[in-house]
Amino acid sequence: MKRTIIATLALATLTAAAHAQQDDDRYNESVVVKGTYKPVIEQAEKLNFPPAITDTLGRIGHSFQYSINPTRLSAKYEPSRIRAARVIGEPATKLYNNYFRLGFGNYWSPLADLYWCSTRDRLKTYGIRVNHLSSWGSLTDYGPNHFGRTTATAFGKYIVGDVLQLSADLGYEHDHNLYYGFTDSTLLSELGWTRHDISTGDYRASYNVASFNFGLKNMELDPNKLGYTANVQLTDIWGVYGQNELNLRLEGDVHYGFSLANRYKGVVFLHADWDAYANRFAPNGTMPLGYGYLIGPAPMPIPTPIGPAMPYPTDTANAYRNIVRVNPYADFMLGGLQFHAGLTTACDGYTDSATLRIYPDVVVSKKLLRDRLVLSLGATGGLEANSINSIRLENPYITPNADLRATSHYDFSLHGRWTLSKKLEANAEVRYSIVDNLLSFRLDPLYGALNNVFNTLYYTANQLTAGGDITFVNDEMITLRAGGHYYHYDNIGLADAPSSNTTPEAVSYRPDWDATLAASVNYLDKWFIHLEGQLLGKMQAGTDPHTGETVETPLRYGISAEVEYRHNRALSFFLRMDNLAFQRYMLWQNYPSQRGLFILGLTYTIPNK
């Protein structure tokens, strides 16, 4: 019944449509479909064929079109704008641009250290520092042993255009000490004088040093681009007895990166320097006390008024010395080995005739055991000048007209560094050196009566050095370090000595061994304690001019300590102690030390506004 009704309705609809289109056999109605747009992409198959209806009245042609016009709806909801996140770094540490340290100790020993500099600046830094330390004590039987040192330095650095750094410093230094290495009994027996007959000005050594340094360095950090540095150093030193030395040093280097087989990277360097000295000794009518009084079989008769037994030198002596060094080398990695390979060519113009010397400059290193062990094997060498300025810093009791030479050495070494843990590290080294003009000292026979002034003495020798140290660090709170060295010399001879001279048995003022034990403690960043002990073996000090016997300095055992309490960032207090073993040791023949030195003081920083 339902199927009959549906068929009847369909037939009626088609019959009406046929009568309505009897003038045109094509169905051309246009249907526009509108609906709500949903922004969802759905999977569907497109119909590629039109619907067809077959009727007994014939086929009806049709043209059916449709279009869909989507309309985007504007959302009425507007989310609130999220503010840009602001990265807040750690606040810059406050810098203090000044401090001064003041202290005073036994033997009338004042200490002053003043420092001022600019604060944080990306392009420039400048400042000044002044330091003073002196002692005005006396030794029983030896009289006053005053010494003092005052330095002042102004420095600055400026970066130009982020590509070039300029630096300069200007300094002045004044040093003084006494040739106190004679007893009251020696003074009386040899010269017939007492302490009341002389003044400290008769045996006082004084030096003034003025220096100027200027340097430039490019700020290129890429090793594959050209980099360079250059420095000019001018130093002038003059002493109270007419000695003068002007030193000009020019040095610089260039470096450039390179590749090996497009795989291994390295950097090649060329370093060169010229070290020139102009020395002048112009006696001004004075020499240290004891000059010219030679020892005889009996105490020499002393005329009244007392005068020198031989005249002071009056001739002016000039000398010009220079050393030129050129050192090309390269640093690179190859096959797991780190190479430093090059050579040094040096022109030794420190003596009357210039000599060309060539030294190796090769070091090969290898990391083992996951970088815990680093072994280095090296063959190096060099030429260093022994100038008035360097010699008087090593031995302050040197004669005003000391013999000056350059030391040449070839060194062959094996070094190892073993990181046992994060807190424990050990170092060991064995070095064999062939040395020409090895610097040492002996009492100058021109001061034979008092034996209180030294002259230089140069050796030729082969030196074997073996030693090492071990360091323990516990979170920067406790640091312990122990180390030592053993020294052995063979093929010892005196430089420029006639072959008939007796071969020396040892090198003067060179110990056979030394040892050090040090401990540092940082407790809560409030208490800082440093304790150090040193042992120095016996040293041959030459011969006794009276008996001709060999003289040795005794074993030295020194203990020093420093304690500092920081009340706050601006104020702290300190106590320095030296020679706590109270040993009267002798680093130089006839020159005993004080038994103990204590300096108590404070450090204060003026807060910035």
Image (cartoon, helix red, strand yellow):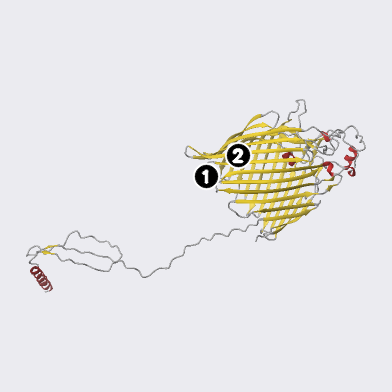
Residue at 74 percent of width and 42 percent of height: 393
Q: Which residue is mark 2?
A: 252
Q: Viewer-proximal residue, 464 or 138?
A: 138
Name the side, left or right, on which 467 lies relative to 339: right
Which residue type does callout 2 highlight? Gly
Report which quarter residue 349 is drawn in. top right
The relative height of residue 533 versus residue 446 in the rendered view (above or below) is below
The relative height of residue 69 versus residue 129 in the rendered view (above or below) is below
Q: Residues within 10 Å of mark 2 (few under 14, many from 20)?
A: some
Whether the residues at callouts 1 and 2 have beta carbons within 8 Å, the answer is no
Quadrant including the N terminus: bottom left
- Residue 167 horizontal/vertical position (percent): 62, 46
Q: Viewer-proximal residue, 283 or 9?
A: 283
Farthest top residue in view: 500
- Residue 359 horizontal/vertical position (percent): 62, 33
Please tell me which of labels 1 and 2 falls first in the chain: 1
Name the side, left or right, on which 511 lies relative to 230: right
Regarding mark 1 in the picture, which secondary structure is present there? Answer: loop
Which residue type does callout 1 highlight? Asp
Regarding mark 2 in the picture, which secondary structure is present there? Answer: strand
The relative height of residue 181 versus residue 83 in the rendered view (above or below) is above
Instruction: Give the distance between the C-alpha atoms of the residues marked 1 and 2, in whole angstroms.
Output: 19 Å
- Residue 233 horizontal/vertical position (percent): 66, 41
Residue at 62 percent of width and 43 percent of height: 215
Report which quarter residue 435 is drawn in. top right
Q: Residues within 10 Å of mark 1 (few under 14, many from 20)?
A: few
Report which quarter residue 53 is drawn in. bottom left
The relative height of residue 345 versus residue 79 in the rendered view (above or below) is above
Q: Which residue is mark 1?
A: 222
- Residue 598 horizontal/vertical position (percent): 78, 52
Q: Is residue 394 visible?
A: no
